[in-house]
Image (tube, helix red, strand yellow):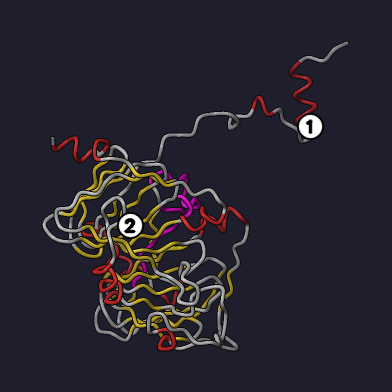
């Protein structure tokens, strides 16, 4: 006597088997790109102020507000855009955030205030507006605030990737033996590097990238094919990205310049440093100004336009992770495909 299809399925399922032809995921077309999202600074800053009232780093280690994607399924679905998680972290004068380390790579981009210092493997990294500070995976890091006004910075981590891979490790302080590091002065001159490098070599020996240096480099950077000037934060030892998996760059949109549209399967988190303008991401138009943060989810066409003056935008993406997997895809469109141009005609 032959078995019915339902009986066959029951036997397969009981043995931990499932027919591929019944899979809800196999052979289906890719989903439509996720819509971009904007965290407008004018709206976020009062909400950050509430965090100062609510708790302290002494109570919760880090006073952090995570920026969750609108498509996050729950508070446990910790992602801002694809494999990238962004958050606001803030300190009051005199506060400290005690040391810890974890496998997740993280970076800090200063938004507001002066006087904060991040210590990475014991090396002090002052944090001024526009500065980038790296805390690569399993480097000890702690924060203190020596200034006189509140400070707020943008944290960006590759938490979603580590959660998916099952590689999350967290270790609280104290630091029993500070790791060996090298002074930034050893790498302060372009095209010159020491013969001997002390400490870890799997990430940049430089943890702080001052904003003034980046602006100077942008002045001499040629425009990319889409018309935007870009510079990349690099490891001075090998010219590769400053930190694995998370790619950091700064782009400048010259005054009244409209970029050609581009599309990539990387996921981007963008923080506006200076200037104002607009971006069209998929079919969504975003108006932005200084300290706003917005996302460019993968597979969306995106174009940017600066309004009145040069605009600079700090960009973090998972492009390096995609590139290492030989999966990165990047496309350049034409003016004819630009939504901004179409609407202005």
Q: Is residue 343 above or below residue 5?
A: below
Q: Tag 2: Cα neighbours inside 10 Å, few (<14), some, or many (≥20)? A: many
Q: Tell me residue 31's x, y (percent).
A: 46, 34
Q: Is residue 71 magenta?
A: yes
Q: Report if the CB atoms under discs 1 and 2 are less than 8 Å apart.
A: no
Task: Choose top left, top right, bottom left or bottom right for residue 22.
Answer: top right
Task: Give the spatial CA distance, label 1 vs label 2.
Answer: 48 Å
Q: Give percent across and percent down for residue 228.
A: 27, 56
Q: Secondary structure at mark 1?
A: helix
Which residue is depicted at the point 26% across and 71% down?
Answer: 215
Q: Residue furthest left?
A: 308
- The answer, for residue 98, to whether it is visible in the render is no
Q: Quadrant of the C terminus?
A: top left
- How far across and how far down the image is residue 130, in percent? 29, 71
Q: Predominant secondary structure in magenta?
A: loop
Residue at the spot of label 1: 14
Residue at 49 percent of width and 58 percent of height:
320
The answer to which image quadrant residue 56 occupies is bottom left
Numbered badge on residue 270: 2
The spot of residue 3 in percent (x, y) is 82, 15
The mark that comes first in sequence, 1 or 2, is 1
Q: Which residues are magenta?
A: 70-90
């Amino acid at each position: 006597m032959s078995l019915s299809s339902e009986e066959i399925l029951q036997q397969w399922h009981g043995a931990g088997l499932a027919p591929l032809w019944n899979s809800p995921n196999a052979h289906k077309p890719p989903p439509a790109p996720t819509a971009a999202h904007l965290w407008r600074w004018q709206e976020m800053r009062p909400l950050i102020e509430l965090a100062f009232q609510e708790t302290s780093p002494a109570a919760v280690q880090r006073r952090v507000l995570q920026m969750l994607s609108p498509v996050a399924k729950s508070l446990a679905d910790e992602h801002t855009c694809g494999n990238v998680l962004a958050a606001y972290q803030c300190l009051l004068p005199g506060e400290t955030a005690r040391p810890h380390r974890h496998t997740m790579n993280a970076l800090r981009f200063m938004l507001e205030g002066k006087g904060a210092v991040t210590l990475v493997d014991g090396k002090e990294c002052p944090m001024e507006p526009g500065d980038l500070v790296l805390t690569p995976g399993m480097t000890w890091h702690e924060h203190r605030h020596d200034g006189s006004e509140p400070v707020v910075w943008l944290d960006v981590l590759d938490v979603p990737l580590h959660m998916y891979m099952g590689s999350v490790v967290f270790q609280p302080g104290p630091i029993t033996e500070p790791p060996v590091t090298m002074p930034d002065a050893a790498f302060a001159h372009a095209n010159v590097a020491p013969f001997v490098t002390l400490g870890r070599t799997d990430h940049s020996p430089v943890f702080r990238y001052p904003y003034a240096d980046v602006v100077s480099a942008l002045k001499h950077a040629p425009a990319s094919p889409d018309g935007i000037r870009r510079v990349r934060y690099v490891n001075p030892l090998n010219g590769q990205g400053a930190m694995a998996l998370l790619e950091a760059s700064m782009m400048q949109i010259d005054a009244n310049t409209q970029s050609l549209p581009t599309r990539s399967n990387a996921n981007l988190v963008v923080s506006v440093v200076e200037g104002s303008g607009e971006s069209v991401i998929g079919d969504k138009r975003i108006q932005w100004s200084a300290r706003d943060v917005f996302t460019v989810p993968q597979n969306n066409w995106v174009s940017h336009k600066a309004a009145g003056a040069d605009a600079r935008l700090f960009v973090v993406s998972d492009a390096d992770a995609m590139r290492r997997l030989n999966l990165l895809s990047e496309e350049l469109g034409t003016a004819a495909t630009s939504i901004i141009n179409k609407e202005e005609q």
